[in-house]
Image (cartoon, helix red, strand yellow):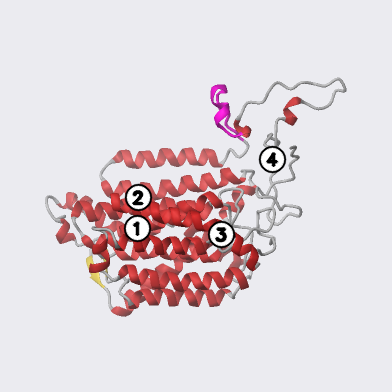
């Protein structure tokens, strides 16, 4: 575990330290596209944040290769090298897109080629465990098609959700944390070495996201661009592919006791099939809804619009930061709920906890105008918008209040707007707000 933490910290440090110089390079290179109709930021912001994330990935793999225990992953498996090859290719395509806006079909072809490169080097799905059937061996073509499909779906799901400051990096970091805990448990508890590469990929992915988030949180100073969103999507898919089909029920000795107990104990075998779906559940749902919505309107599935889930949260009145936190909440609920179920599938408390937290999430979702207030003793530790307003003092002229001048974060009534409304160019996609400095 110490070596995983060291790898994570090195990856995060390299990504964080390189993001500043990369931002300056992106400005000089002109990788600052004009604000589009579907964008929610106020002014042109440089892209190419994926450059720093890619070098963070390289640093993490290099450090892991020189550590005592993690070096065995490189000796016994070719999967880290396969990941690096596919990541380099998808990163290069993303950099070109951030600069020159290449065609969507070309990007799709590049994603398939990157997945094929990983398959050729051994990072592929060999078999899948199916409930009631057992382990089903796949032919070479079946494994290749399934691997390529999972990579392409994951990359585009992450790319679709990259619409608000810090959203994609935070959601993928949450997913990677849940996946790391799952893969590490399979490797450490059951002694299955095939899960070690997936644990390494998840630790490095967390480092990449954590190192980039300080620069990308609202208001973002740099965007990861397609070079970053496609990269972290590929790494996330690579971890899922690495562990899927590698869990041997005979090694785990799960076929003991009654049939009912065997079914509950077999949950860790089936979870590799479900975990990749749960960790990208929200991005995948957004992807499917976008395709259906655009096809229904007679548009291309790759046409951009303002109908994504995060855009809808802004339209109903949530602020930028709260919309991101709500997406974080549901991502964590799905990912860690599946993780808890894999640990103890027979516990009713897990189901009840997920239902209770889901209800809390729905309440938060439907209260866009509710602003929590910190107690007075804690007001010095929270942003001004969470502090209690002072009593309004009416001036002699009968106009103006002291609360109106409390600072730039003074709360005003939020007016929901429809997608594509004119004049909406702020990071919160809300109406204009008076601000004083």
Q: Is residue 98 magenta?
A: no
Q: Is residue 372 magenta?
A: yes
- Seen from the viewer's position, the closer of residues 11 and 430 is 11
Q: CA distance from mark 1 to mark 4?
A: 39 Å
- Horizontal relation, residue 394 to residue 373: left or right: right
Mark 3 or 2: in front is: 3
Q: Residue at x 33, y 49 (%)?
A: 339
Q: Earlier in the sequence, mark 3 or mark 2?
A: 3
Q: CA distance from mark 1 to mark 3?
A: 39 Å
Q: Residue at x 50, y 72 (%)?
A: 92
Q: Secondary structure at mark 2?
A: helix
Q: Secondary structure at mark 3?
A: helix
Q: Which residue is mark 3?
A: 21
Marks 1,3: beta carbons within 8 A: no
Mark 2 neighbour class, 10 Å CA radius: few under 14, some 14 to 19, many 20 or more: many
Task: Find residue 338 and name its label.
Answer: 2
Marks 1,2: beta carbons within 8 A: yes
Q: CA distance from mark 1 to mark 2?
A: 8 Å
Give x and y (percent) for residue 157. Answer: 49, 62
Q: Quadrant of residue 63?
A: bottom left
Mark 3 neighbour class, 10 Å CA radius: few under 14, some 14 to 19, many 20 or more: few
Q: Earlier in the sequence, mark 1 or mark 2?
A: 1
Q: Secondary structure at mark 4?
A: loop
Q: Which residue is mark 1?
A: 274
Q: Secondary structure at mark 1?
A: helix
Q: Which residue is mark 4?
A: 414
Q: Residue at x 42, y 38 (%)?
A: 356
- The residues colored magenta run 370-383
Give x and y (percent) for residue 265. Answer: 20, 51
Q: Earlier in the sequence, mark 1 or mark 4?
A: 1
- Horizontal relation, residue 422 to residue 23: left or right: right
Q: Residue furthest right?
A: 397
């Amino acid at each position: 575990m110490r070596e995983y933490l060291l790898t994570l910290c090195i990856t995060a440090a390299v990504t964080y330290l390189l993001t500043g110089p990369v931002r300056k390079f992106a400005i000089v290179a002109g990788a600052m596209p004009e604000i589009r109709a579907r964008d929610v930021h106020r002014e042109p912001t440089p892209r190419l944040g994926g450059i720093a994330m890619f070098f963070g990935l390289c640093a993490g793999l290099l450090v892991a290769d020189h550590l005592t225990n993690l070096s065995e992953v490189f000796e016994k498996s070719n999967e880290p090298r396969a990941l690096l090859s596919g990541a380099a290719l998808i990163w290069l395509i993303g950099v070109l897109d951030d600069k020159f806006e290449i065609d969507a079909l070309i990007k799709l072809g590049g994603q398939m080629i990157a997945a094929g490169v990983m398959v050729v080097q051994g990072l592929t799905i060999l078999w899948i465990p199916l409930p009631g059937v057992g382990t089903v061996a796949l032919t070479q073509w079946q494994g290749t098609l399934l691997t390529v499909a999972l990579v392409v779906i994951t990359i585009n799901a992450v790319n679709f959700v990259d619409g608000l400051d810090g959203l994609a990096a935070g959601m993928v970091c949450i997913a990677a944390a849940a996946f790391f805990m799952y893969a590490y448990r399979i490797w450490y508890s059951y002694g299955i070495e095939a899960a070690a590469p997936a644990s390494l990929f998840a630790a490095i992915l967390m480092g990449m996201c954590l190192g980039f988030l300080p620069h990308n949180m609202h208001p973002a100073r740099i965007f990861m661009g397609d070079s970053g969103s496609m990269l972290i999507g590929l790494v996330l898919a690579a971890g899922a592919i690495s562990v899927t089909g590698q869990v041997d029920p005979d090694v785990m000795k799960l076929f003991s006791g009654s049939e009912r107990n065997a079914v509950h104990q077999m949950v860790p075998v089936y979870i590799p099939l479900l975990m990749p779906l749960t960790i990208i559940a929200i991005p995948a749902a957004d992807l499917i809804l976008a395709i259906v919505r655009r096809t229904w309107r007679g548009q291309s599935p790759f046409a951009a619009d303002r109908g994504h889930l995060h855009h809808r949260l802004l339209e109903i009145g949530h602020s930028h930061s709260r919309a991101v936190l709500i997406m974080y909440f549901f991502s964590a609920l799905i990912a860690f709920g599946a993780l808890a179920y894999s640990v103890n599938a027979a516990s009713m408390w897990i189901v009840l906890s997920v239902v209770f937290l889901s209800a809390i999430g729905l309440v938060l979702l439907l209260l866009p105008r509710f602003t929590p207030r910190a107690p007075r003793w804690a007001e010095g530790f929270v942003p001004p918008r969470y502090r209690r307003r002072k009593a309004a003092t009416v001036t002699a002229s009968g106009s103006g209040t002291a609360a109106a001048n409390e600072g730039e974060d003074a709360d005003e009534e939020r007016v929901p707007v429809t997608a594509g409304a004119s004049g909406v160019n702020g990071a919160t996609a809300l109406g204009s707000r008076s601000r004083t400095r």
